[in-house]
Image: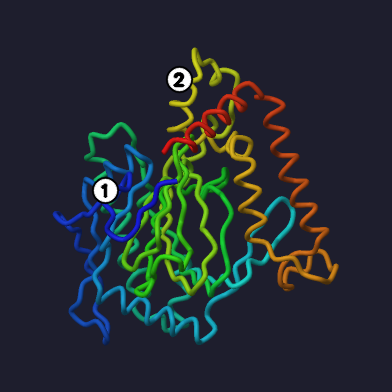
Amino acid sequence: GSSARGSDHGMAVVCRCIAAIFLLRSLPTATMAKRNIELSINADLLAQVQKENHAVVDDFISQEIADQLLADVNRLYSSGQFQEHYFQFGGVLLKKPNVFELDLSDPSKLDVRDFGIWERVVRDVGPSFIRRMDELDRTSSGASSLSLQTNRPPAIKLQINAGGGSFPWHFDNPGPPNKRILTCVIYLNPSWKEGDGGEIVLCPFLSRSIVIPPLHRRAVFFLSDRILHRVLPSNTRRVCFTMWCNGQGVNAINEVVLSKDVLQFTSYDEAQRFFEKSPLQRVISRAVYSEEYLESLLECLVIRVDNTIGDADAEGVTEEERRLLLKQHDSSVLGIRTKLRPLIDEFRRRKLRTETIN
């Protein structure tokens, strides 16, 4: 697939939002007194998200703020505030080796611990960010509206990949009761270089994948219910934080149920155009990209020697758990292909043609 590396302007979507920088004012702290946290947000960014379902912004935060954020991440990690990351596939809860997270979605946590500059991010920057994005959305002439929920702040999570971890293909909003509409990932990796791994890969439906390096101060935006994505294995330490904004009317019945009425297409070209912009692509995604899903899932698993099934505290999975995961994947793919075989087969042919285009 194509890739975004450093200041490569050849990537499909890179927004360098220089003009109209949005100033987020937050309360001063002892270490950052009289400093404001500035995020590069403007109408061009929103227009890219509306048009392409994703956008990339370099220099999203200042060098000084990024360094302070990273310093407080390191302090919190060293003091044991991060928890190991778990993910669920089917009915199995699995630990992802070497990936640690700190969920800041609950503001009450801020009253009992010293989170440093992250308290400003949670209390001030997050709410201001979603309000500004909503203002731009409501005044935009774009065809797609985010309809953000401004009465609640975005969920915020810090993440450290200590090296070796990866994430399989997934949607940040896989379906109800999830309400996420917009994902924003910001990277804090001042020494990242090619070969370090940990790139995020976006896969717009039936388009070539976009490999985006986790460069320091870079932000990646995408629609949570329409962009399939994964994270490649990291060969070194990788740090980021994510803000998820909820939307109004997300996962309405016509966005989660693929009915016969929806499938009244006059051509496969028409069907492709529909699914490219619709959250209903989630219904068929695993069948269209079955090999890619499986490869990424196996890549993030570590097989352990003992045979204790369901031990969430153990490192990796047993061979039996691995077998069950593969069976669940195959069963899911078969269920979709059985009902929609002509459509799935055609989309899989188009996917292969896309991958062979230079």
Up-down relation of residue 126 to residue 90 (above or below):
below
Residue 99 in the image: x percent, y percent? Answer: 57, 70
Q: Which residue is mark 2?
A: 270
Foreground of the two, 79 or 153: 79
The three-letter code of the residue at mark 1 reads: Leu
Q: Residue at x 64, y 50 (%)?
A: 295
45 is higher (above) or lower (below) than 36:
above
Please give the count of numbered marks on the rendered protein.
2
Q: Amino acid at mark 2?
A: Glu
345 in relation to 191, above or below: above
Is residue 283 visible from the viewing direction of this image?
Answer: no
Disc 1/disc 2 C-alpha distance (Å): 27 Å
Q: Quadrant of residue 288?
A: top right
Q: Secondary structure at mark 2?
A: helix
Coordinates of residue 121 in the picture (x, y in percent): 34, 69
> Image check: 94 left or right of 129?
right
Camera-nearest label, 1 or 2: 2
Q: Which residue is painted at 45% across and 32% down in the image?
A: 276
For residue 23, the mark is none
Disc 1, SS: helix
Extreme left residue here? 19
Q: Position of residue 12 (x, y in %)?
A: 33, 44
In the displayed structure, 257 sits above or below 21; it is above
- Please say if the residues under marks 1 and 2 sit with CB atoms less than 8 Å apart: no
- Badge 1 crowding class, 10 Å Cα cut-off, few under 14, some 14 to 19, many 20 or more, is many
Quarter-of-image position of residue 260:
top right
Give the residue at x 48% y 68%. 106
The residue indicated by pointer 1 is: 45
Using the rendered image of the protein, determine whether residue 288 is visible from the camera's viewpoint: yes
